[in-house]
Amino acid sequence: MARVQVRISRRYRCIRSTCRVQLIVGLTQNQSHQRIIHRLRTDGSPRTRGLLVRRFTGDSTPFEFPVKPVSLVQEWPADPPFKPEDFFRADQNDDKWFYSVPKLVYHIDEPAVASLTQYYRNNIKRGSDVLDICSSWISHYPLEFPDTMGKICATGINTLELQFNDQLTGGYKQADLNVETVLPYPDNSFDVVTCVVSIDYIIDPIAVLKGAHRVLRTGGKIIISQSNRCFPTKAIAMWLKMNDRQHLELINGYFQYAGGFEPRTAHDITATLPNNGYRDPMFIIEAVKA
């Protein structure tokens, strides 16, 4: 069972999650992880319980999913203007300690998850080879993707979370991109790279995007999605000082300095609710490999 606590901050929503998954006494860590996975799957996880899965993919909801273009207007200088302190994080400890306990929870709300899933459905071509970086127990792809895509692979920090991701037809590789920015895949391996609400945690995003460019085939694209939730102690300093609009401009700047991409496009894909109630915003920025 997972318990999620959310509080509102001035410019972003902070998410705190604790997952009540404990190692089983008397077993090795790997054996314990396998037992946990079996229990979670047989007890009915959101990925395998039909009703909940349909809701979180937007297939059985009253939500609407508009896609509104966002103009990227900030002009960036020839050289990156960033300072080392821009990438400072309040928690400078090794990320493996922060992510050692698996967080088998959604980090954005139901409408935001559903809007992202629907966007993927409409914007990733059938038969594509897909890589999800900074991944976890769920990649937010439509349910049919394991059958309609080529291979689906992922990298992430927590091995247990990745083992629980049932959409990874091509497997996963454990990787901390704040330690090693080189993606563990050959050149020209994928048609699409996705990154969900995680670019704000990366301390060398330009190097990571260069790596994503390397593993993409010509004409392939990166889809970065971003909301306003985060673990504030792990997000970089300049991110916490910006609003949603500025985040998109910043990501566009990262792409410019990574090089090798066509002009980027950005969209507001925030879902709408029948009662106009609160929902987490969701934004997309896409970059095609030139």
Image: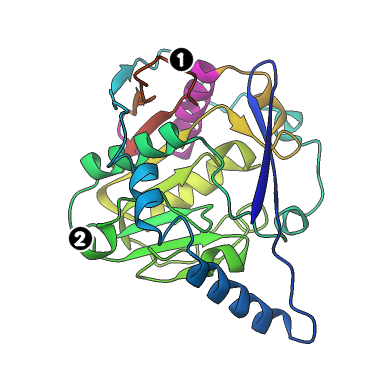
Q: Secondary structure at mark 1?
A: loop
Q: Which residue is mark 1?
A: 75
Q: Residue at x 76, y 30 (%)?
A: 85
Residue at position x 30%, y 43% from top?
Answer: 120
Q: Going by the image, does 219 lie left or right of 103? A: left
Residue at image point 46% right, 17% down: 277
- Asked if the residue under mark 1 is in contact with the one under mark 2, i.e. CB atoms within 8 Å, the reply is no
* 10 Å crowding of disc 1: few (<14), some (14-19), many (20+): few
Q: Position of residue 240 (x, y in %)?
A: 68, 24
Q: Is-magenta flag for residue 260?
A: yes
- To which quarter of the image does residue 266 belong? top left
The residue furthest left is 126
Front residue of 27/30: it is: 27
Q: Amino acid at mark 2?
A: Thr
Q: Is residue 72 above or below residue 147?
A: above
Identity of the residue drawn at 33% across and 63% down: 189
Q: Is 205 in front, or is 76?
A: 205
Query: What's the image's color scheme?
Result: rainbow
Magenta range is: 244-263
Say which residue label 2 marks: 148
Question: Type of residue at label 1?
Answer: Glu
In the rendered structure, the answer to whether residue 3 lies left or right of residue 89 reads: left
Rendered-image quadrant of the N terminus: bottom right
Image: 226 above or below 75? below
Q: Which mark is residue 231?
A: none
Q: Quadrant of residue 100?
A: bottom right
Residue 95 visible (yes or no): yes
